[in-house]
Structure formats: structure tokens, C-alpha cells
Amino acid sequence: MAFFVLTTCLPAFLIAISAVFAGPWPVMAVLSLTLMMAGLDHLVGRVAAPLPEDENQTADRLSACLAVIHLGLVPLVVWALSGDLLTTIDKICLFVASGIFFGQVSNANAHELIHRREQHLFRLGVWVYISLLFGHHVSAHLLIHHRFVGTRDDPSTSRLGESYYRYLGRAYTGAITAGFMAEARRLKRVQRSFLETPFVIYALGAFIFWGGAYAIGGITGLVWYVGLTVFAQQQLLLCDYVQHYGLRRHRDSAGRLEPIGDRHNWNAPHWYASGMMQNAPRYADHHAHPYRPYPMLAMTADGPILPRPLPVMAVLALFPPFWRRVMDPRVQHWKDTPTP
């Protein structure tokens, strides 16, 4: 567990220091989430072993602490970006580091929390997503993505040949619509009022954070805050794009979907990025066991593997010709490989 603490808390510490001090700290915060991660993964390689089960309680405590840290960093960073303490270069570095941290570490942690059965942990995850103005993702992920992943019924599943930029609009609006409709159907089944939909909480929470950003830094603070959330949302959408690119589940003659399996997710076994993202790159095991705590997630024995760490592949996805050159042959390999 010490490794998860180090990889997730180190950038949070550097971002907090960067918000109140000038000097090398903002640059170090960026480097800790980019070149250092990529370099260590290149040097160390791949690690596949899960942690012992007795680490799960400690893992939940770390997840709760990270959620609280995130909810504290958001106003601190908005304050720093809105003020005059930092130089322009410092602010740019702080913005980049915070956006990456919110979109990769905070997102991975919130994803873990919304899969916990304990209500206090679940609610923490929800509020992390709300703080990123992405509350609808909770409903879309739990009610749509896990059920329909690998099909056209899941807006978050990217298609072979589809660029990230084409995927972006479809996935964003599709998740809102599909999540909203799924919640409406659920409320109808249990005979609850429409006002009880979590989308009311998502919307009210967004207004609270908008108001908080305005109170901290006026219009400038609000603009910085919205910019940070948009940047973080792109990190989340890029992860979804990369982790399901081109992989499909088949339907039988009766229209039933094949069970979710190792072949329907791109895994990334790289050491440091996996620690930083709480084993989110071990995606096949997560889809097979959605409530399995992240220390217990293992690399599957037979499934698609990304050639580089997940954050590195997310950067590559921003350049569609290079992305397709690397990934399309790999997708075709799995299409041509018979199902065991």
C-alpha cells in the first residue's frame, strides 16, 4: 500500500506547495505526473501481482483521504490561479499539473469510490465527480457502461477508426442522455418521484462549486475553475477512449450479449502509472469484478495489452494518424484471434 500512497500523494503535495510558493515547485508538479511517470515505467517495466486481501481496508482509507485532498485542492488551486502570488509561467504549470491530477488521479480514485458498497465512500466519489462538473458520469458509468460496454449502446465505447475528436462529442452528450434515461427508468420501477433523481444533486452541486469559485476569485476564479474541469474531463474521456478502442462484444442469434471478458478491454500493466491511477489500467479484471478493491486487481492472463502506459497512450490518441498506425493493427489482431 505504501506504493499507492507515494504515487498518488506525491503530486498532490507538489500541487499544494505550488499553489502557495513560487520557484521550482509548479514545474516539479508537472514533471511528477508526466516525464517521471513515463521514465520510471520505461525503466521498471511491468508488474502484475495483486496485493494481499488484508490491504483492502487501508486502500479504502487512502481513497477517502484522496477524495478529501481533492476537494481541498480545488479551491486552493482556484485561489492560486486567481491571485497575483504566482507568475504567469507558474500558473500555467500549476494549471497543467492540477488538470492532469484531477483527470487521472482524482478520476481514478472517484471511480474506485463509486464502486464501493459503503455509502459514505460512494458519496465521496460522487462529490469528486460533481466538483469536476461531471456528476452525470456516476449514473452513466454504473447503469450503462458496465452493462453495455463493447457495444453501440454504450456511448463510452470508442469504435475502430473513430478519432478521439469524433468520439468526444458523442461520448459526452451520449453519457448524459443515457445516464438520465437510465435513472428515469429506475425511478419509475421503484415508484419514486422524478425529483429524487441524482441528476438534481449533480446540477445543484455544480452550482455550489461555480458559486464557490466565484466567491474565491470572481469571474477570473470562475473561468479558471471551468477551465480546470474541462481539462480534467478530457483526461477522463481519453482514458475511456483508449481502454475500449475498437474492441467489441458479440450478440448471439437470440440477441444476447456475450459475457464481458478479457478481450473487451485494453490493459496496461505498467508499474508507476498503475500505482498513480489505483490500478485503473487493469481494466479487464475491474469489468469482470466491478466491486473488487483496486489492490486486488490483477493483470489478466490473455487479453489486449497497450504498448505504453495508459497516460502515454492518451497523449498519442490526440494525434489520430499516429494513434491508428499503432492501434488499428492490434485491434485487427484481436478480431482475427478466435475466442477460446
Image (spheres, rainbow, N blue to C red):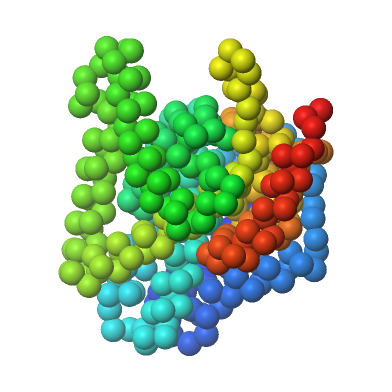
Task: Depth check: give the residue in front, 138 or 24.
Answer: 138
Residue for point 30% across, 69% down: 224
Q: Is residue 221 left or right of residue 334?
A: left
Residue 238 on image: x %, y %: 51, 55
Q: Is residue 313 left or right of residue 72?
A: right
Q: Is residue 47 left or right of residue 259?
A: right
Q: Is residue 125 above or below residue 45?
A: above
Residue 131 on image: x %, y %: 34, 51
Q: Is residue 204 above or below residue 37?
A: above
Residue 51 on image: x %, y %: 75, 42
Residue for point 48% across, 87% down: 23
Based on the displayed image, in which of its 4 quarters is residue 284 positioned? Answer: top right
Residue for point 53% across, 73% down: 29
Residue 269 on image: x %, y %: 74, 51
Q: Is residue 137 visible?
A: yes
Residue for point 44% across, 28% down: 143
Q: Is residue 69 visible?
A: no
Task: Depth check: give the residue in front, 171 or 280.
Answer: 171
- Image quadrant occupied by the C terminus: top right
